[in-house]
Amino acid sequence: MTTENWISIISIISGGCIGYLIKYSLDKRTLFSSRNAEIKREIYKDYVNTILKTVNEFQQQDGAPSKSQQERLIKELQNFHKKAVLYASPKVLDKFSNMLQHAYREYKDEENGLRTMVLMTAVFKEMRKDIGLSSRGLGSGGICLLRPLINDYDKIIRQKEFLLYANTKLYLLNNKK
């Protein structure tokens, strides 16, 4: 065999090895992304269930939530945060922290509940984006995601949906310190 034949054989073998390594690397990355997406879906589902359960409880009772309800909600949100730190995108974590920072402060104005809803739906919307779902058609900031839970949504929120979203954005800009 000549040197040219050896070079050809070595080139073919090394090309095959390099191709195999590239394919192996891409397969590993795809598998990781797939597993990560499954974990995100579970974490996000837990968060959505917590929020929807809380909204449902608050609707069924008159007055402010009890101390035990508040403590349970805080504990569940802290558990979500522990998991989300490892798997959620930075944008989801930012929206979640905006919502919590708003919740930590006590506001007495009538827009507080609406701002809280806008911030909750912003978290939902960012979660949907993070797992590859579209939020097109869900209103400004995804506010339509809470529509099934709010009895007078069309009367109160639908008419001022964009203003509510813009008001919350301005509010966040002014209160981020």
Image (cartoon, rainbow, N blue to C red):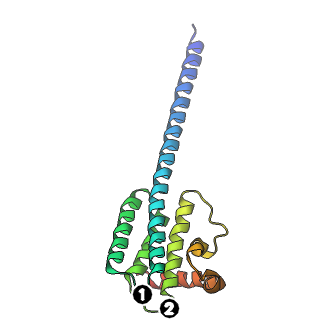
Q: In front here: 36 or 17?
A: 36
Q: How many marks?
A: 2
Question: Residue 1 lies in what quarter of the image?
Answer: top right
Question: Residue 104 lies in what quarter of the image?
Answer: bottom left
Discs 2, 1 touching: Cβ within 8 Å? no
Residue 63: which disc? 1
Coordinates of residue 51 in the picture (x, y in percent): 46, 70
Q: In front here: 154 or 159?
A: 154
Coordinates of residue 133 in the picture (x, y in percent): 60, 59
Label 1 packing within 10 angstroms: few (<14), some (14-19), many (20+):
few
Coordinates of residue 53 in the picture (x, y in percent): 46, 70
Left or right for 15, reference 176: right
The first of marks 2 and 1 along the sequence is 1
Residue 88, can we see it? no
Of the residues shown, which amino acid type is indicated by label 1? Gly
Tag 1's secondary structure?
loop
Quote the CA–CA distance across marks 2 and 1. 15 Å
Coordinates of residue 103 in the picture (x, y in percent): 41, 80
Q: Give the residue at x 44% y 61%.
A: 46
Q: Give the residue at x 45% y 52%.
A: 39
